[in-house]
Image: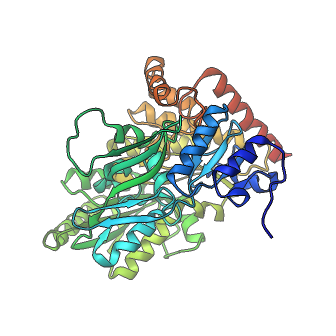
């Protein structure tokens, strides 16, 4: 039996006509609840509707309708974002990209592929692995996050130390602008394209400048060899200094990850335990790759550095199966916190590597100050920290304390010359914290850039940049949600 529209709302009726009718739109409350937040679950808001276009033309028609009828709207991928960038705080029409999930083409000769925004990150590597190629950006959610969402947030991952984040692998974009116009920015791998860097501007703009509908990405040849090291330390500071020593020695690992004791407790209690000692203070997971001739020498240097930094135990993966188990354990890091805490808040700060011991000690002080455990899982090689604030929303006041503790962690990063985000974006979570790294003139200049593209601020409005009214409103709504949970 064909599904029928059960509302007289003219916007719902008209939007349904722009796609494949009732089967391509959600508007009932019981259906919309699944879209009231992304991975930042502290704040929730229902959208007006969720529309599922199947191609660029339908996206453009939806955008044009929303723009001409003053309806706020935003694009959404898999909803794995961690900063609230896909939360419809203005009751937006959500344009879901999940049906636009084709791998359009693969060009091995020129090392590029073209995908639609709903194409899942890891699926691209899986599709080209048998040909000896892979896609480098590897966020922890790569098994379910979409490449379109990665472009919006400029996602990184464990291997971004050597290979860079999403923006380093984008060669072209097809974009629907906030007025419904379609533009094609295609650089085809040209090193120095004349004019402004529109690819760089749009990548990481958090869905506030346009909606990406087609992506040309760079694909890489698999390295000839790779080896992975696991090192256990009795002091966090020893592990931190080992990180700086490795990079200072001229070694550029493909990945250099760190977890502290609380994080290790979580990953060992979750889906992929590997037997990490529970009494160690920190571990490093280090991977080097490249031509076979130089790998063993780099591994020996890394082993020597770890030993000089009082490592308790250090070992090299004996085979691909052991390496895969170590990485599966690390990749579950965020979700694993659910095994040891009712709720957790993921943060995403960046610091100079040399400041690791100082900032980790400050985070420990913040944990004691607020009476909340903080687990640290992070990309140590490029100083991208992920303090996870553990709390229980059922306890009155703990949600607010978690938010304050998370903000304090970001302030600690900014105070040493770092930043408030390395790969998760600002969204609504860190808008006020933008003031930690930008003054009012700098924020105003960035806002003016947004207004060039998004004149009426209908596309994902109220995100990324602080404004007095909006910040107060969002923080107030967060507290209302927290109070409702506790009730």
* Tally of marks: 0
The answer to which quarter of the image holds residue 337 is: bottom right
Tell me, yes or no, if residue 241 can be seen here: no
Residue 463 found in image quarter: top right
Q: Quarter of the image for the N terminus: give it.
A: bottom right
Q: Is residue 426 above or below residue 378?
A: above
Residue sitting farthest toward the right: 487
* Percent x, y of residue 263: 53, 60
Given residues 240 and 444, the one toward you in this image is: 444
In the rendered image, residue 230, in percent from the top left (x then y), is placed at 37, 69
Image quadrant in which the C terminus is located: top right
Q: On the picture, is 486 further left or further right than 458? A: right
Residue 357 or 96: which is nearer the viewer? 96
Residue at the front extreme, as displayed: 17
Please, is residue 63 above or below residue 282 in the view?
Answer: above
- Looking at the image, residue 339 sits to the left or right of residue 234; the answer is right
Quick check: 10 left or right of 238?
Answer: right
Query: How did the renderer colour the structure?
Result: rainbow
Regarding residue 278, the answer to whether it shows in the image is yes
Q: Quadrant of residue 417?
A: top left
Please name the residue shown 22% across and 50% down the image.
Answer: 248
Residue drawn at point x = 33 percent, y = 82 percent: 319
Q: Residue at x 34, y 49 (%)?
A: 172
User: Residue 28: x and y, percent?
Assistant: 80, 52
Q: Residue at x 57, y 61 (%)?
A: 99
Q: Residue furthest left?
A: 293
Q: Where's residue 3, x and y in %?
A: 78, 63
Q: Nearer the viewer, residue 149 or 73?
A: 73
Q: Nearer the viewer, residue 443 or 176?
A: 176
């Amino acid at each position: 039996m064909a599904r029928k529209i059960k509302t007289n709302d003219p916007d719902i009726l008209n939007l349904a006509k722009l796609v494949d009718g009732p089967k391509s739109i959600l508007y009932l409350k019981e259906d919309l609840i699944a879209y009231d937040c992304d991975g930042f679950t502290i704040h929730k808001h229902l959208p007006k509707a969720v529309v599922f276009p199947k191609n660029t033309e339908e996206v453009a028609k939806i955008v044009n309708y929303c723009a001409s009828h003053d309806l706020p709207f935003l694009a959404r991928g898999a909803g794995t974002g961690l900063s609230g960038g896909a939360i419809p705080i203005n009751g937006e029409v959500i344009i879901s990209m999940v049906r636009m999930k084709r791998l359009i083409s693969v060009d091995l000769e020129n090392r590029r592929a073209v995908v639609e925004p709903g194409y899942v990150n890891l699926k691209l590597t899986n599709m080209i692995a048998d040909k000896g190629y892979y896609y480098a950006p590897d966020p922890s959610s790569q098994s379910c996050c979409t490449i379109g969402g990665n472009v919006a947030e400029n996602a990184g991952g464990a291997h971004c130390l050597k290979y860079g984040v999403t923006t380093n692998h984008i060669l072209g974009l097809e974009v629907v602008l906030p007025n419904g116009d379609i533009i094609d920015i295609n650089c085809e791998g040209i090193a120095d394209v004349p004019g402004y860097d529109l690819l760089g501007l749009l990548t990481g703009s958090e869905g506030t400048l346009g909606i990406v509908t087609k992506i040309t990405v760079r694909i890489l040849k698999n390295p000839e060899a790779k080896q992975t090291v696991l090192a256990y330390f009795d002091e966090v500071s020893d592990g931190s200094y080992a990180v700086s020593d490795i990079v200072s020695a001229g070694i550029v690992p493909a990945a250099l990850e760190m977890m502290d004791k609380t994080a290790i407790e979580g990953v060992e209690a979750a889906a992929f335990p590997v037997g990490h000692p529970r009494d160690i203070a920190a571990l490093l997971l280090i991977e080097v790759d490249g031509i076979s001739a130089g790998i063993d020498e780099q591994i020996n240097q890394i082993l020597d550095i770890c030993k000089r930094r009082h490592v308790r135990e250090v070992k090299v993966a004996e085979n691909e199966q052991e390496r895969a188990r170590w990485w599966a354990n690390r990749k579950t890091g965020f979700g694993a916190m659910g095994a040891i805490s009712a709720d957790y808040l993921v943060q995403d700060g960046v610091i100079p590597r040399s400041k690791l011991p100082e900032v980790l000690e400050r985070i420990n002080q913040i944990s004691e100050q607020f009476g909340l455990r903080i687990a640290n899982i992070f990309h140590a090689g490029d100083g991208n920290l992920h303090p996870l604030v553990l709390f229980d929303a059922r306890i009155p006041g703990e949600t607010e304390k978690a938010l304050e503790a998370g903000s304090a962690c970001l302030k600690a990063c900014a105070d040493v010359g770092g930043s408030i985000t390395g790969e998760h974006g600002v969204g609504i979570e860190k808008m006020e914290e933008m003031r930690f790294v930008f003054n009012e003139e700098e924020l105003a200049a960035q806002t003016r850039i947004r207004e060039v593209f998004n004149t009426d601020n209908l596309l994902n409005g109220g995100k990324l940049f602080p404004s007095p009214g909006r910040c107060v409103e969002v923080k107030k709504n967060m507290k209302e949600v927290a109070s409702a949970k506790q009730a």
